[in-house]
Amino acid sequence: MDSPAQLAQALAGTGYLADAGLATAGYLAVKLRRPLFLEGEAGVGKTAFAQALAEATGAHLVRLQCYEGLDAAQALYDWDFPRQMLHLRAVTAAQAHPDPAALEAGLYDRRFLIARPLLQALELQPCVLLVDEIDRADDEFEAFLLEVLADAAITIPEVGRIAADTPPLAVLTSNRTREVHDALKRRCLYHWVEHPGFEREVAILRRRLPRLTGELAGQVATAAARMRKLDLIKPPGVAESIDWAAALSALGARTLDPQTAAATLGAVLKYREDIDRVRGSGVLEP
Amino acid sequence: MIEVLVGFAATLRHAGVAATRDRVPALLAAAAELGAGDPAGVYWAGRLTLCSEPDDLPIYDAAFAAYFGGTHPAAPRGLPISVTLPQVSTPFAGGTGAGDDEPAELFSLAASPVEVLRHRDVAELSTVERDEVRRLVALLEPATAPRRSRRYRPARRGTVDVHRTVRAALRQGGEATRLARQDRRTRPRRLVLLLDVSGSMSPYADALLRFGHAAVRRRPTLTEVFTLGTRLTRVTRAMRHRDPDAALRAAGAAIPDWHGGTRLADSLHAFLDRWGQRGTARGAVVVVCSDGWEFGDPADLAGQLHRLSRLAYRLVWVNPHRGKPGYEPLAGGMAAALPFLDEFVAGHSLAALQDLVGVIARA
């Protein structure tokens, strides 16, 4: 891969249509081996980008969904205590006097280690590590993640150091519920993902839903673009317009008429206030 | 080319983007990768490595156009948010009270001990008294009460901690002799301060911003401060300066609508769309400091407060006029807001601000 355009082409091959900025961001992340920090409205395709990037570069995808209270045992590794216990009992039952040192070494064997996403990302190669919604984790977790990403290695006291030959390509996403530390952002490439323009949205809809008519795709994209200008509580992202188009297509609609549109609004708008507003605004009229 | 790019990073720094020097190597590497001769390559190399939040992007575009001349190649369409470019303004010009700088008042402090000063309306203080109140406000420690978090910690009582129990058992040859226990950790709630800096609130804005500074100093990562007026401005970063005066200067430079009109509903709407709904207000103690003077339709304000009250854990309204005898919350905006508030308190004096600390801690 020699240029952002080639990456965009590879991504398109997996069904993800990236614009120039996102393709450049992805290209630089691959070339410079820097984590990519993506922000943008919900539903613009941040998570889907990581999945497409993994597919386009032929890498494994490991996803770490962040939430409050996420700690090392859930993000990094854990010991399989029940199996260790069984092993211990089995050995002591088979031999009257087992060698204590060998027994202990056997207890902390790799097969009793449960790899959580960060350890998996170091062991699977090549790998795209998607750290989704980093802003949901506690800020202590960021420092810890930073350390793992910087070294591309972790040290497990009983086993030793586990390092990746090829560091995983990290894609971090955030919804900005709190500010992520500068120390983390500084090490990343930062990109704000935008809603797609009309033509790209039509292309995305047709790519995702091959049975959709061109006319319906155009109408859905137009209506979604108009809704985004309506000052709604939750303006629809591409994810919502895909859901909507899928719902319309499941009902066998070939064009967007006001009745079918009104019946399927729940696929694209998720607040009662927004539905009322869109119904009253005449956006759905042809 | 290297000098040009380093110079560009410096320009961006001056324009207010946190394009620190340690980001420059990444810029150079990215530009080399994309081809430094290509304007689009330079544009994206800089944008991806030097910016770190959406507010940086319009500044970046303007700086890029100014530095390299012409317009940037891939003009991004309108961002969902708009920011004004930072401008040099005169922070806190003008006093925050009547009768400034009268030499005769130099003597008045001696005659007004702290206890009396505590209950004086901050709008009516002399310069010397105001300095004393500022000093005392800086000593306040507004902090929210803890809530149970999702994280566990070892404890004497609580649910059984299977991991520690089995770990201990393995050390003793597989015999569990004691049950280890764990309990939920507690974490403080987030505190969000929304301060009205419009003209009608100007006598109180200084004290309230200082209160905000004290809150940010107390819990830097769990406190957010915004100013409301004709628009929304986030001043949390400015408030992280250690020195209150430096923090207020930085905030003053960031606030474009200082002493302007009030469009509370619009500013609250902007807050909810850009921050509140995404999580900043969720489960937080939200404190709105305003006199409730609203230029727009009070029904809009009621709608936004209803939204906010559903997101927030507690919604507190601070109105400096509440501390005045004979005040009734009749101003259109204030009357519309009342049904959605958990607490309605005064914030006109040092004592009232101390009470506010108590309200925040109880909430």
Image (spheres, grey):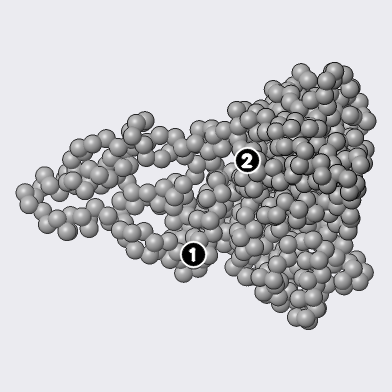
Position of A282 relative to A37 (above/below) = above
10 Å crowding of disc 2: few (<14), some (14-19), many (20+): many
Do the residues at discs 1 and 2 belong to one chain? no
Question: What amino acid does circle 1 point to?
Answer: Ala
**What's the residue at 53%, 38% (across, down)?**
B187
The tag on residue A91 is none
Distance of label 1 from label 2 (alpha carbons): 41 Å
Tell me the SS state at disc 2. Answer: loop
**What's the residue at 74%, 32% (across, down)?**
B116
Q: Where is residue A284 in the image (x, y as percent from the top left)?
A: 87, 30
The C terminus of chain B is located in which quarter?
top right
**What's the residue at 46%, 69% (across, down)?**
A165
10 Å crowding of disc 1: few (<14), some (14-19), many (20+): some
**What's the residue at 64%, 48% (across, down)?**
B217
User: Can you tell which of label 1 and label 2 is closer to the viewer?
Assistant: 2
Is residue B32 at least partly visible in the picture?
yes
B125 or B187, nearer to the observer? B125
| Residue at numbered disc 2 | B141
| Residue at numbered disc 1 | A152
Q: Where is residue A163 in the image (x, y as percent from the top left)?
A: 43, 66
Question: What amino acid does circle 2 point to?
Answer: Glu
Tell me the SS state at disc 1. Answer: loop
Q: Given the image, what chain letter belongs to the residue carrying mark 2? A: B
Q: Position of residue B107 (x, y in %)?
A: 82, 44
Position of A22 relative to A219 (above/below) = below
